[in-house]
Amino acid sequence: MEELEELKRRQILHTAKAVFIEKGYIAASMKDIADACSMAKGSIYKVFESKEDLFTAVFEDCHRTMFEQARELDHSRDGAPPMERLRRKIEFQLQYMLENYFFMSEFRELPIIHNEKFIVAWKKKRAALLTWHRDCLHEAYGEQIETYIWDLVALFRGQQREYITYAHQQVIALPMAELAHFCVERIDALVRDMLVRKPQPVLNETTAYFNHINPIDPGTKVRTIDEFLQAVIDKIQELPGADDTRQELLEVSALLREELGRAAPNRTLLRVYMTFLETEVELRSYVRQLNLMVK
């Protein structure tokens, strides 16, 4: 009996996935899915209480399958060098993401993103992907990239996301195996450059992981703004010209920093301070960015 119920559930998930891909989340109805399953709509509702629950289950199943196949790939080690294993993993993910493109997206414009069950599933997926990508790079390069691991993960993910979008839009005709080889070579160039030049890392585990999954919390936002203001102060100290001009800019920056540190900053004062800083041409891009951060 349990086996029959599981077979029924698998049939619904498989069919629903095809219907959602064909019609989209909004247009697809439970009746459409029931008809495609050759079932009564009530039979679907006995297994899934709502379209949101069914969509979430399909989303989870799609990603669970990907991670299971990825683990199988990890376990099938055949003595290949680390870079070749990395290439295989990238090829696998590129191909899987292309074949399941609809369920690999972020759904930011769809009402499903406000469903609590889907939010939980979405966060778990993002966390698992981050961990997998970090582990892929760690396996290939070892502890030498620990300082830059989250910057490399961000660059790696951005690279994959953009190329998969182009592949889905059919504007590139490169086989995934060749694209994976191209991606590995670009990642390797980035790693080598970072190890030689030793730049200051941009991301850490908190910024890359926790705030990638959750909305930024007030404490983290305050710390980020304060760190950015320090970058503004450092820039002011590097400016050429008269000392008294630099001193004025530093004093205004200090006032701005103090005001932003308050529980309820005075918006008028913030505008006055930032308008003054904008009088220095080399600070204008900094102030524009700061304006976006404090909104």
Image (cartoon, helix red, strand yellow):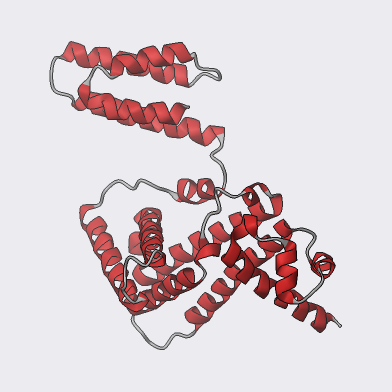
Residue situated furthest bottom in the rendering: 78
The residue nearer to you, when weighing 77 against 159, is 159
Residue depicted at 43% across the width and 11% down the height: 269
Residue 212 picture location, percent across and down: 51, 49
Q: Is residue 61 visible?
A: no
Residue 80 picture location, percent across and down: 36, 85
Q: Which quadrant of the figure has residue 68?
A: bottom right
Q: Quadrant of the N terminus?
A: bottom right
Residue situated furthest left in the rendering: 241
Label tally: 0
Residue depicted at 40% across the width and 15% down the height: 271
| As drawn, 154 above or below 290 | below
Q: Which quadrant of the figure has residue 180?
A: bottom left
Residue 148 picture location, percent across and down: 35, 55
Residue 59 picture location, percent across and down: 62, 64
| As drawn, 227 above or below 116 | above
Question: On the rendered structure, is 9 left or right of 278?
Answer: right
Question: On the rendered structure, is 210 left or right of 238?
Answer: right
The residue nearer to you, when weighing 269 against 60, is 60
Q: Is residue 67 visible?
A: yes
Question: On the rendered structure, is 250 left or right of 58?
Answer: left
Residue depicted at 22% across the width and 58% down the height: 193
Residue depicted at 59% across the width and 69% down the height: 62
| As drawn, 155 above or below 221 | below
Question: On the rendered structure, is 45 left or right of 214?
Answer: right
